Image (cartoon, rainbow, N blue to C red):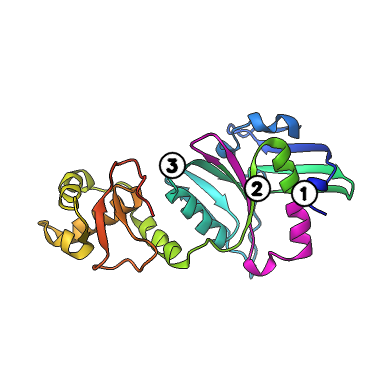
Amino acid sequence: MKAADLQLRSVQVRYLHPDGQEERLPLEAAAEVAFENCGAIRRIPHRADQAHTPSTHWSSTTNRMIDCESHLESVWMTMLDFDPEVSGFSGQPMQLLGVDDRGAWKATPDLFVRRVDGSATVMEVKNPGRLNDAKVKATAERVAACCAAAGWGYELVGEPPGRQRTINVLALAGYRREMVGVSDYRAQLLSLAGEPVPLGQLVSFTAEPLVARAVVLHLCWTGELAVDLTRPLEDTSLVRAAVNSDAGARQ
């Protein structure tokens, strides 16, 4: 059975308001809630020898800590932080409780993502080996049906596409915070990179190459410098100033 064939009945959405107050409302009213600002609706379990690695993720997009259930989920959060089309996201901000023609059920989606155009997507992050698991697919169909009713997109994902790009984005994430020296070097580096230039050569033009390298990597994260992230990030990688500074040059 496909999500579109499910007959949803009495679906409720349980969530935590940003002030910590628990609330519940019908699915029909959920589209009005800014779930990207909400905290996790449940405590993520921590126990010895568990397969998952729960942690908290500092989001450079929202400037707050977000609970995440696994390393893979934290990788996706980093990719979302790097996406200039994403304006906010949250981890497990809602629980769906419903009844359909299969019976009663509940589900807690992993991520809620808001984009700059106002659209929203709910994401379920699963170990790639479990994407075809019958239970995972059944839950995905129900959550997808709820998302369609609320006007949200839905994605069931494993690893992010493009392994080399993911590796590079995770490396750049170490330089995502604004650091001392960025303002001193930004104008000089962007001017020197008016035409494509090897990264190693670009930093050699400055008085303090080690500091300049960190600034270059920060500017690659923000999108002020563009670099091909489908290839390994090395001294020979060509970087150039973006056409505008609005993070639109991320590749």
Q: Residue 63, which numbered label?
A: 3
Callout 2 secondary element:
strand
Q: Residue 154, which numbered label?
A: 2
Amino acid under label 1? Ala
On the image, the x and y values in percent for residue 20 come to 62, 34
Quadrant holding the C terminus: bottom left
The answer for how far apart the CA atoms under marks 1 and 2 are is 11 Å
In this figure, which residue is indicated by the disc labeled 1? 3
Residue range (magenta): 114-142
Residue 179 relative to residue 78: left or right: left
Residue in front for this viewpoint, 50 or 76: 76
The answer for how far apart the CA atoms under marks 3 and 2 are is 25 Å
Q: Nearer the viewer, mark 3 or mark 2?
A: 2
Is 116 covered by the magenta stretch?
yes
Q: Which is nearer the N-term, disc 3 or disc 2?
A: 3
Q: Are marks 1 and 2 in contact (CB under 8 Å)?
A: yes
